[in-house]
Image (cartoon, grey):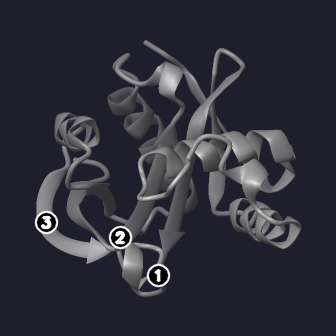
Amino acid sequence: MPTFLFENLTSASKEEIATLSDCYFEARIIDSPSNYFAKLSNSEQAEILAFYRNGKFLKILESGKMVGSIGHGVKPGSDIIMISYILLPMFRGKGLFHPLIDAFAAWCLERYPDKKYFRANAEKTNLASIISLRRAGFEFLEERMDGPDEDHQVPFQCFIKKISE
């Protein structure tokens, strides 16, 4: 069973964030996702660095290696923690997601004891992510369109899971 550590991305290197950013954009509707970050202007790179370093994203470490990132958001008055995640390609398909979600639930309960649910989204075409969410105990909630702008909207499936049973 893997042991995960979560480390704030506020001090992550530019290279680590570039890796995560490229990984995120590989599945999006973008002309050339490989080395996407390097092709951005300095101001666009600064915007992405600030986004990942905002304190809501955590580096996922397993055996001292970065395996991905998990982000979380909590709206005041809500009992839901919204999560987003990226596993680097070399760590996908290895059964890490379910133990990762269990470890992240423990991490969240220490910080947000009043929260009861995780909510996560997966692109409708990302069957591996949908299967991983279901295996980790998430239940389908709804389908909706989302994207970075109106020209890049894609269908998402939304899932919810009770944090502790």
**Badge 2 vs badge 3, beta-carbon distance below 8 Å:** no
Q: Residue at x 20, y 55 (%)?
A: 124
**Badge 2 vs badge 1, beta-carbon distance below 8 Å:** yes
Crowd rating for badge 3 (residues with CA inside 10 Å; few <14, some 14–19, many 20+): few
Spot occupied by residue 94 in the image (x, y as percentages of width and height): 38, 16
Q: Would you place residue 136 above or below residue 47 in this image?
A: above
Q: Which residue is mark 1?
A: 75
Q: Residue at x 47, y 35 (%)?
A: 103
Spot occupied by residue 8 in the image (x, y as percentages of width and height): 73, 49
* Snapshot quadrant of residue 71: bottom right
Q: Which mark is residue 128?
A: none
Quarter of the image that includes the N terminus: top left
Badge 2 or badge 3: first in the primary sequence: 2
Q: Would you place residue 145 above or below residue 164 in this image?
A: below
Q: Judging from the image, what secondary structure is the residue with disc 1 in? A: loop
Q: Residue at x 84, y 47 (%)?
A: 14
Q: Which residue is mark 2?
A: 80
Q: Would you place residue 2 above or below residue 5 in this image?
A: above
Asked whether 106 or 86 is in front, the reply is 86
Q: Residue at x 34, y 20 (%)?
A: 93
Badge 2 or badge 1: first in the primary sequence: 1
Q: Judging from the image, what secondary structure is the residue with disc 2 in? A: strand
Q: Label 2, label 1: how many angstroms apart (C-alpha)?
A: 8 Å
**Tag 2: residue type?**
Ile
Q: Is residue 73 left or right of residue 131?
A: right
**Tag 1: residue type?**
Lys
Spot occupied by residue 6 in the image (x, y as percentages of width and height): 64, 39
Q: Which residue is mark 3?
A: 141
Q: Label 1, label 3: how many angstroms apart (C-alpha)?
A: 18 Å
Residue furthest toward the front?
31
Q: Label 2, label 3: how many angstroms apart (C-alpha)?
A: 13 Å
Crowd rating for badge 2 (residues with CA inside 10 Å; few <14, some 14–19, many 20+): many
